[in-house]
């Protein structure tokens, strides 16, 4: 009888619905538990700071507190001396900011520690909190974005988006681009050409997508566009699920030249005519080149009616100091988290 029930399509739909509800409840429960834990940590941080102001207990206070809490709650993690110090530091950092605990309570404690350990500026820290919430970043991805200096590189590409896209989409599209793009994950010779660069990026497509940012879906390389019997091949074609548009990426292993923008503008016209549907927004072009001069790019893009952004890329084992966030690596963060248990 049970086998017959299992094969019944109605039962399959029924059990799938139940499973989805269970998974949804699990996610909601996990979020709720995290928020309650962080509320507890926030209150503990406030009480610790206030008590240390009122007394002269010194450094022995937190050590004794840790011992007593671990004795009374042996099955509960997070009461190590190190974590109590982090709780105090976390509270002091965010209590000075206008948002208080509202945003940080929405991301896990481990993510909070990554941000706390690497960032000293409230604006930058809040940026990574919000991006973690928006994109559901894992701790490893969050660390990668911080160490890659995402905050300092976002929206820095030279574009004509304001002139070619409506206001909401133009702002979102500009924030989607980085400048420079960090291709430090590639291992190619210093004097490489576009073909080598393209091959290397496609071979490392997962890391390339991570560097591009959330929302990019890879559709193919050298995507064939047939126009009146002639074939044309843009380097890389993506679809951006948040911008709801096709994205054409052209790679140049040399300095920017105005004619590069003309070719990309042509590809965008072709994609809009051949691939774009009524549900899609206008296609966007990204030209990633070895280097570019801002004014030259601005002049080159001024009279084009297709949205194009121009960025540089870098391949180096060490990011310049201005793109480095302060202190530990992901391995050090992981070690810190393990020691809290």
Image: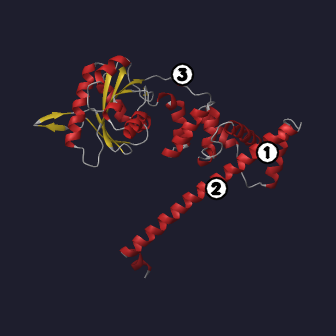
Circle 2 SS class:
helix
Residue 258: % across, % down: 27, 20
In the picture provided, is 127 more to the left or to the right than 183?
right
Location of residue 322 with respect to 81 vertically, above or below = above
In the picture provided, is 234 more to the left or to the right than 190?
left
- Mark 3–mark 1 CB contact (< 8 Å): no
Residue at 38% x, 75% y: name it: 10
Mark closest to the chain's N terminus, 3 or 2 = 2
> Which residue position holds label 3?
322
Residue at 54% x, 31% y: name it: 147
> Which residue position holds label 1?
47
View extreme (left): residue: 229
Circle 3 SS class:
helix
Circle 1 SS class:
helix
View extreme (right): residue: 56
Instruction: Please tell me whether mark 3 or mark 1 is closer to you in this view.
Output: 1
Mark closest to the chain's N terminus, 1 or 2 = 2
Q: Quadrant of the N terminus?
A: bottom left
The residues tagged by marks 3 and 1 sit, at their Cα atoms, a distance apart of 37 Å
> Which residue position holds label 2?
33
The residues tagged by marks 1 and 2 sit, at their Cα atoms, a distance apart of 21 Å
Location of residue 62 with respect to 310 vertically, above or below = below
Residue at 39% x, 40% y: name it: 168
The residues tagged by marks 3 and 2 sit, at their Cα atoms, a distance apart of 38 Å
Q: Pointer 2: residues within 10 angstroms few (<14), some, or many (20+)? A: few
Location of residue 258 with respect to 11 vertically, above or below = above
Residue 287: % across, % down: 32, 28
Q: Pointer 3: residues within 10 angstroms few (<14), some, or many (20+)? A: few
- Mark 3–mark 2 CB contact (< 8 Å): no
Location of residue 95 with respect to 299 vertically, above or below = below
């Amino acid at each position: 009888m049970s086998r017959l029930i299992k094969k019944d399509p109605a039962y399959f739909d029924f059990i799938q619905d139940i499973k989805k509800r269970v998974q949804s409840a699990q996610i909601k429960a996990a979020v709720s538990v995290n928020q309650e834990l962080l509320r507890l940590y926030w209150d503990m941080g406030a009480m610790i700071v206030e008590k240390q102001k009122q007394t002269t207990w010194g450094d022995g206070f937190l050590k004794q507190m840790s011992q007593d809490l671990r004795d009374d709650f042996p099955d509960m993690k997070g009461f190590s001396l190190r974590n109590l110090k982090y709780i105090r530091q976390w509270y002091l950092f965010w209590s000075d900011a206008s948002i208080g605990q509202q945003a940080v309570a929405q991301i896990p404690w481990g993510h909070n520690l990554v941000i706390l350990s690497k960032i000293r500026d409230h604006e930058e820290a809040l940026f990574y909190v919000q991006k973690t919430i928006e994109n559901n970043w894992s701790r490893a991805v969050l660390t990668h974005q911080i160490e890659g200096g995402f905050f300092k590189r976002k929206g820095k590409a030279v574009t004509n988006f304001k002139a070619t896209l409506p206001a909401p989409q133009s702002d979102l599209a500009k924030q989607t681009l980085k400048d420079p793009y960090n291709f430090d994950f590639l291992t190619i010779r210093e004097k490489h050409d576009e073909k080598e660069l393209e091959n290397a990026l496609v071979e490392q497509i997962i890391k390339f997508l991570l560097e591009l940012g959330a929302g990019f879906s890879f559709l193919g390389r050298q995507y064939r566009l047939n126009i009146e019997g002639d074939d044309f091949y843009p380097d890389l074609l993506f679809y951006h699920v948040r911008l709801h548009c096709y994205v054409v990426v052209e790679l140049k292993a040399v300095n920017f030249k105005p004619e590069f923008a003309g070719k990309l503008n042509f590809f965008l016209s072709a994609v809009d005519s051949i691939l774009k549907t009524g549900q899609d927004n206008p296609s966007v072009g990204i030209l990633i080149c070895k280097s570019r001069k801002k004014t030259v790019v601005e002049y080159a893009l001024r009279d084009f009616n297709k949205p194009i952004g121009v960025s540089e890329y870098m391949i180096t084992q060490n990011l310049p100091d201005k793109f480095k966030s302060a202190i530990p690596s992901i391995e050090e963060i992981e070690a810190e988290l393990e020691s809290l248990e």
